[in-house]
Every structure is written in C-alpha cells, then in structure tokens.
Image (cartoon, rainbow, N blue to C red):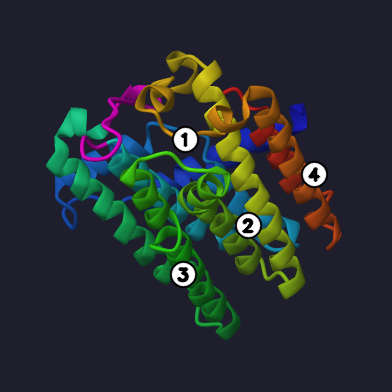
Amino acid sequence: MNDLKQYLTARRSAIDAALLAALPGPPACPANLADAMRYSIVAGGKRLRPILCLASAEAVGGDSALAMPAACALEFIHTYSLIHDDLPAMDNDTLRRGQPTLHVVAGEGMAILAGDGLLTEAFALMAREPRGDDSSLVARKARVIGIVAAGAGTAGMVGGQAIDLTGGPLDADGLRGMHARKTGALIRASATAGAVMGGGTDGQIEAIDRAASEFGLAFQIIDDVLDVEGASAELGKTAGKDAAAGKSTYPALYGLDISKRMASECLDRAAAALASMNLADSRLLQIGRWIVERSN
C-alpha cells in the first residue's frame, strides 16, 4: 500500500504541474475568467480520472507521457462538471474540495463561464497534444476525442445529471443506470482513453473498459456510503446532503453493509476482467482497491 501511495503522490504531482501548464491565461483568456478556472483546478481533489488514464497507458506497455494531455483534459471536464453541479440551479452546494464553491467566490455567471471554458479547453487540448503527424498518433487522438465526448455528453455524464435533476425515487436499475452515466461514464472514458493513447490492443482496451465500468460503480457506491458515514471536514464537501434531499442512494436502497459488499464485488469483477488480458498485476487493480477503501 505504501508503494501505491508513493505512486499516487508522484502521479498527482505530475498531473498538477501539467494542469497548470495547460490552463489558458491572459491575454488570450480574460484574467477574471482565467482566475476562476484556476481556482477550481488548483483546489485539489483525488485526480482519480487522470491517474486512471495514465495507469491504463502504462498497463498496456505504453508511454504515459502520450496520455498526459488526455489526462489533463479529463480533469478539466470533471472539474467543469463539479462547478456546474454546485450551482444553485443544480445541487446548490457551497463547499467543494474543502473550499467555498466557485459560484460563492466569483458569482454564478463567472462560474458558468469557467465551467464552459474548462470543457471547451479540454477538447482543444486533446486535439492539439501530443503534437506530431504520425498517422497512428493522429488516429489514437481522434479515437480518444470520440471516447471522451461520449463519456461526457448526453449518453454519459450530462445525461446522468439530467436524470438526477428530475428528482423522484429510483429503483435499483434506475439508480445504477443513472450513475453509470453520471459518474461511471467519465471514469470508463478515462481508463479507456489511456489504454488507447498507450497503444493497447483491442482486447486490452475492452478489458480495461469493463474493469473501469466496475470501478465507476464502486466509486459511486462508496461515495454514497461516505455521504452517510463521513464528516464534511473529511469529505471536503457537505456530508449528509443526499439524505436531506431525499435522493435515491445505495445505502437508502440496500443499507450500508450490503452497499459495502456490492462495492467489493465490483472489485472482484474488475479483477476478472483485467486477468482475462493478463493485466491483473498492473496498477489498475490497486487503484480499484483504493477506490473501495478510501475515506473521502
């Protein structure tokens, strides 16, 4: 586990530096908009999605440097989604990553624009980097742009948020379907994008996609558990908000003990998927365990 902690720390450090380098600034970007985008990016976070992207590239024997632009783009997209989710018209939250949410600091209009900016800059970054006119690299970049767009769009994250916004109770299938879009789709896209940029075979990419689907479900289950068991100071966001809003969650449907068991079963299925292509010894399964065992 100490080895994993060192790996995560090193990857977060590299990702943070790359994110700062990729953020737009004046004069091309107005200073107030650049400051708003930077505020939410530098607030921290687990960096799960970019880490998965890099780890997947490494798992298939590729160069993680080729996956770094996609990794940064995925964190841009994730951060934009958090900015918009926190708005009064959505979840109306005032705390994110242990700090006041962006609309509290900069106003709703600037928060919307910062989210829009991060989303569009993400695709500009993937189209631009890594540079090179090698036909294989160009094809991989185009494929990744499509994968990320699908994971972030109406069939994925945005669609899941729309389902969540409609309110009302969901049954087990409805809850799983919503979170497969809202949370799982971008996690899947992160891992798959890394495998593509790393030059993985179709079989490797498919196995990583199946494993990442299980990681996404486990992440959401544990998120729901922590919303019940955690404290706001530990989570970096408001605890107990789902229950207060009457939202459907895994603990509400199944109870805490069964929910935790379901998360462990996700990890078992992910391990089987990775083992099918001899990828079980990669960092990916360790990251999956971290997802299940995390406390924030």
Image coordinates of residue 217 in percent, x first then y, are: 61, 45
Left or right of residue 246: residue 291: right
> Mark number for residue 64?
2
Q: Amino acid at mark 1?
A: Ser
Image quadrant where one finds the C terminus? top right
Q: Amino acid at mark 3?
A: Ile
- Which amino acid type is shown beneath numbered disc 2? Ser
Which residue position is annotated with label 1?
248
Q: In this rendering, does residue 199 appear at all?
A: yes
Instruction: Measuring from the top left, give residue 286's x and y in whole percent.
Output: 75, 40
Measured in 3D between alpha carbons, the distance from the residue under mark 4 to the one under mark 2, in whole angstroms, is 26 Å
Q: Magenta residues: mostly which secondary structure?
A: loop
CB-based contact (under 8 Å), mark 1 and mark 3: no
Point out residue 145 in the picture as x, y percentages from the top left corner: 46, 70
Distance between the alpha carbons at the discs numbered 1 and 3: 32 Å
Distance in Å between CA atoms under marks 1 and 2: 38 Å
Query: Does dot 4 land on a helix, a strand or a loop?
Result: helix
Q: Which residue lies at the image location 49% right of the left edge and 24% below the top edge?
A: 227
Q: Are marks 4 and 2 in contact (CB under 8 Å)?
A: no
Q: Observer-nearest residue: 255 or 203?
A: 255
Residue 84 lies, with reference to residue 42, above or below; the image says below
> Can you identify the residue that label 3 sits on?
145
Quadrant including the N terminus: top right
Q: Earlier in the sequence, mark 4 or mark 1?
A: 1
Label 2: which secondary element: helix
Q: Which mark, residue 268?
A: 4
